[in-house]
Structure formats: structure tokens, C-alpha cells
Amino acid sequence: MTQSLLDFSGFIKFFVGLFALVNPVGILPVFISMTSYQAAAGRNKVNLTANVSVAVILLTSLFLGDSILMFFGISIDSFRIAGGILVVTIAMSMISGKLGEDKQNKQEKSETAIRENVGVVPLALPLMAGPGAISSTIVWSSRYHTWMDMLGFSLAIALFAFCCWLLFRAAPLLVRLLGQTGINVITRIMGLLLMALGIEFIVTGVKAIFPGLL
């Protein structure tokens, strides 16, 4: 579908969607527990590694994701529906309070305990730049192809990673201020926003595949 220059609201929507998908506030307690044995310098290093990795993963998805789909012969509308279903599934788990269970299985949790550097795995992948965030990025990149659009999305990803870095820097203070109840409330609100975004992906894909249905 040919699109004109994406307006500024589209970049904001992509940015907010990433925040809802990743839910960095909800990951704060996980980050604290994974780095609890480290001094401030070590925790800051893990924070930087994790968010640089997230930016690299999402930028790779932004610029190469569409080519990967073409290589495997997958239409973007089919991928949009699949991505929307995945996003809705993640949103449902967030609303029900099952933090992280959809992003990290038991084996990955057990492996975390013996890893010295948790910045890339599992913090960046799969906890932050998981399947939902990657599929959402590919869907957006497939709809807008101009260099201005890609620049806007790249800046949104960079800003998102920077905001996550700031959040994790303030992780000990934020966890004390919000408490588990506050974190749970924010997680559920993010889940509602995320579910609306996922449904929009599904509806857009269904409209393209079955134009006479809706």
C-alpha cells in the first residue's frame, strides 16, 4: 500500500506501542533481581549493554525484516495478522498480571542464574526485544518505505532505548516509590493499550486479505 510521508503522530504511535509491548516499568524488578549481586558500576554496564542490544535488534528488524519475509514467501498481511495475535496474547498476559511468563520459559530462567552477563540474554532478548516488539517493528516498516519514514522510526527506536536506559538507571528508586502494586497497575494499563494496537494490526491484515469481508 503506497503511503505519503508519515506524519509525526505515526512516530509517536510507534514509540508508545514499543513501550506498551516491552513494558520496561514492569521489567524493573527483573532487572534489579538479575543485577542485585553487582555494584553500581556493574549494574550500569549491564543496563547500557541491554539497551544498546535492544536498539540493534529493533533497527535490524526495521531495515531487514521485510526482506526476510520476502525470502520466506510470507505476505506482510499474513505476518500482520500473526503479529497482531501475538501482541494480543502478550497484552492478555499483562492484564492478568503474568509478568514475563510469555517472554521467558523455565529453562531460560534457570540459565539466567549461571550467566555473568545478562545484558544481552535474557534482558535484551527475549525480555525486551521479544517476538512482539520485533513483529510490530516489521509491520510498521512494511507499511512505510520512504527514507524519511525510516529515519523517523530509527529515531523513535533510539529514543525508546534511551528512555529505557534512564528508567533502568533509576530502577532502585522507582521500585521503592511505586512498589509492586504500582508496577502491576502500570503493567495492566500498558496491556490495555497493547491489546488495542494488536487488534488494529489484525483488522488491517484481514481487510487486506479479505477486502469484501469488512
Image: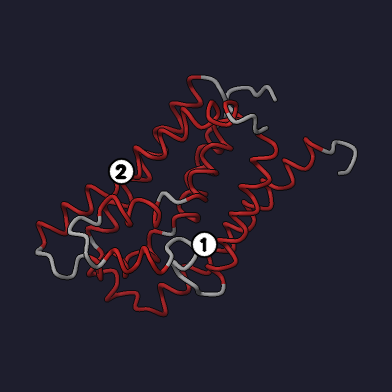
Q: Are marks 1 and 2 in contact (CB under 8 Å)?
A: no
**Residue 167 or residue 69, whichever sits in front:** 69
Instruction: Indicate the amino acid at tag 1.
Output: Met
Residue at the spot of label 1: 190
Q: Tell me if 38 is positioned left or right of 54 in this view.
A: left
Residue designated by label 2: 53
Label ID, residue 166: none
Q: In the picture, which quadrant includes the N terminus?
A: top right
Q: Position of residue 104 (x, y in %)?
A: 42, 63
- Secondary structure, mark 2, is helix
Pick out the residue farthest to the right. 212
**Vertical placement of 5 versus 124: above or below?**
above
Figure check: 138 above or below 3 = below
Q: Nearer the viewer, mark 1 or mark 2?
A: 2
Quadrant housing residue 81: top right
Q: Quadrant of residue 25?
A: bottom left
